[in-house]
Image: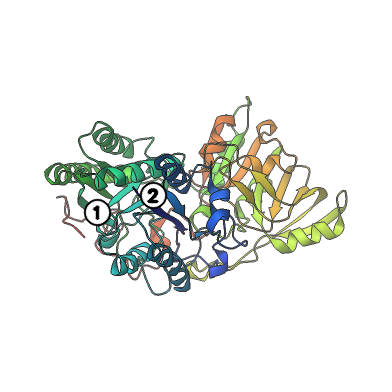
């Protein structure tokens, strides 16, 4: 018997169509934004043993004794729509590898990628692959924040989505998708049922670990884990994209009757609970005051600015939250990272130990939101300068080597402010510890995140206060200039009919 040949590839980008941060093809790096895609054996080396679907695919191939080609692994931080060239690059690499012989294709995708010409980047990739390989078995692993389209749901053979947010089950998701593909290749029923709702949840309250999503995800997981169906995935959607197919959705694969019944049950429950997916926004000054009034205890109070979250496409240089914290007299604080290469360069030029006055952040305007950048002038001592590299030790992206670019720490007395050349959502404490700051010893830690911070920071926190700062990742959907979004959609259109909406 000849040895099987598998192909695996990665293409991930979560697109915020309102973001001012550009996404050139060069932004699709190995695990960072500037080092270019990984290819071949280098991709295997970079991703092997990490908490990523691609790592699971590598392990499946080795276990099955199959030859594995990994033609490309391209990952970009959330930002503005990418050029169509990234689809040309990835599709070309994948199809070239498939053309050399392929028994099964394993894809590690995001599910919320928009390019300049395609609102459904992953669907376009799959369309190009299917045009050349219509019968090829294809497994796809997707992010929980997928914006599901018909092609993305129906073109893969098997499809699995993350069950967690923060995403700590990425490797497991790759295993689910890949194992199901092998079962389907051996005759397991894999009919696909899918549904998408005109329901935009607030990302602060749609985590599968807490109500209202918890019961819905638990029902899907129980059906899959118990063998009722082959795969069952629920997607919370990525609502910061002005495209038609935003909305909570689900895909179920297995015997056709069971799959159809389960997907309607899952979406019916989500629709009934739609009001529970709304997040009440508090004035930022009131939130900071509430944090300041918290009694002392072990660990820091986390102040989480979700209006300028890199992990959702924010520019990470909006300084309003830090300005408010300092104005209200918070001290014993670690803050950042703030993305500002110019400020980093100034502090490096001054050197460790130098007293400097520097403008931090506010270098980026946000025209889609009508916001101008406002730098914050700070005086302090340059405490540390690093290369910005660290290995993730927390449960999200475990084992991945990251670089946030050259990094400097400015000690103002009240706060140690971390400034980096590159954007980074702090889901791992390494962004602080690598530059000599122990966040667990601080009274306050100010970070820009939404939910991923919980992976690395929640275990050390004595309290969490969400800050509704300004930016392109605000939770106030009324502030966005929607043009292409399907309407009516809840909660923008609260009088939408109460019955379960039909398929999009």
Residue 134 percent coordinates (x, y)? 26, 64
Q: Nearer the viewer, residue 475 or 228?
A: 228
Residue nearest the observer in this picture, 220 or 475? 220
The residue that mark 2 highlights is 3
Is residue 329 among the parts visible in the rendering? Answer: no
Is residue 499 found left or right of 209 in the rendered image?
left
- Residue at point 34%, 57% (across, down): 147
Distance, label 1 to label 2, CA atoms, is 43 Å
Q: Nearer the viewer, mark 1 or mark 2?
A: 2
- Residue 28 appears left or right of 240: right
The earlier-in-sequence mark between 1 and 2 is 2
Quadrant occupied by the C terminus:
bottom left
In this figure, which residue is indicated by the disc labeled 1? 197
Q: In the figure, residue 243 lies in which quadrant?
A: bottom left
The answer to whether residue 76 is seen in the rendering is yes
Q: Is residue 262 above or below residue 492?
A: above
Outermost residue to the top = 297
Of residues 38 and 28, which is closer to you in this image?
Answer: 38
Per the image, label 1 sits on a secondary structure element best described as: loop
Q: Is the residue 378 above or below the residue 465 in the image?
A: below
């Amino acid at each position: 018997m000849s040895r099987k040949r598998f192909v695996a590839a990665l293409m991930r980008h979560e697109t915020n169509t309102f973001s001012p941060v550009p996404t050139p093809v060069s932004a699709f790096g190995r695990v960072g934004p500037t080092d270019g895609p990984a290819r071949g054996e280098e991709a295997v080396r970079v991703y092997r043993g990490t908490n990523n679907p691609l790592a699971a695919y590598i392990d499946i191939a080795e276990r099955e004794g199959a030859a594995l080609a990994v033609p490309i692994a391209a990952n970009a931080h959330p930002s503005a729509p990418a050029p169509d060239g990234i689809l040309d690059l990835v599709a070309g690499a994948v199809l070239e590898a498939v053309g050399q012989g392929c028994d099964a294709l394993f894809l590690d995708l995001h599910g919320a990628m928009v390019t300049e010409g395609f609102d459904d980047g992953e669907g376009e990739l799959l369309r190009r692959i299917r045009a050349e390989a219509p019968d090829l078995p294809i497994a796809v692993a997707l992010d929980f924040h997928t914006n599901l389209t018909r092609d993305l749901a129906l073109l893969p053979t098997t499809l699995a989505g993350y069950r967690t947010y923060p995403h700590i089950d990425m490797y497991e998701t790759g295993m689910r998708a890949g194992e199901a593909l092998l079962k389907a290749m051996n005759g397991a029923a894999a009919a696909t049922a899918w549904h998408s709702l005109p329901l935009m949840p607030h990302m602060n309250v749609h985590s599968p670990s807490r109500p209202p999503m918890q019961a819905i995800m638990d029902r899907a997981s129980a059906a899959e884990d118990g063998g009722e169906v082959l795969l069952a995935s629920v997607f919370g959607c990525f609502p910061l994209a002005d495209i038609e197919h935003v909305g909570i959705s689900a895909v179920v694969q297995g015997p056709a009757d069971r799959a159809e019944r389960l997907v309607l049950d899952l979406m019916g429950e989500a629709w009934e609970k739609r009001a529970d997916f709304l997040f009440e926004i508090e004035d930022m000054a009131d939130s900071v005051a509430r944090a300041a009034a918290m009694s002392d205890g072990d660990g820091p109070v986390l102040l989480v600015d979700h209006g300028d979250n890199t992990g959702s496409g924010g520019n990470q240089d909006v300084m309003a939250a830090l300005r408010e914290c300092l104005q209200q007299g918070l001290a014993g604080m670690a803050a950042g990272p703030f993305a500002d290469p110019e400020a980093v360069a100034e502090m490096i030029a001054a050197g460790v130990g130098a007293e400097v006055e520097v403008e931090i952040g506010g270098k980026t305007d946000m025209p889609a939101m009508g916001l101008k950048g406002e730098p914050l002038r700070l005086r302090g001592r340059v405490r540390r300068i690093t290369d910005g590299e660290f290995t993730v030790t927390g449960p999200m992206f475990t084992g991945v080597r990251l670089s946030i670019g050259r990094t400097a720490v400015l000690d103002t007395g009240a706060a140690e402010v971390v400034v980096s050349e590159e954007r980074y959502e702090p889901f791992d404490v390494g962004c602080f510890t690598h530059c000599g700051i122990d966040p667990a010893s601080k009274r306050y830690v100010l970070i820009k995140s939404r939910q991923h911070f919980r992976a690395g920071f929640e275990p050390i926190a004595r309290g969490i206060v969400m800050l509704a700062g300004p930016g392109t990742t605000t939770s106030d959907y009324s502030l966005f200039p929607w043009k292409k979004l399907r309407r009516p959609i809840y909660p923008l259109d609260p009088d939408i009919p109460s019955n379960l909406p039909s398929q999009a």
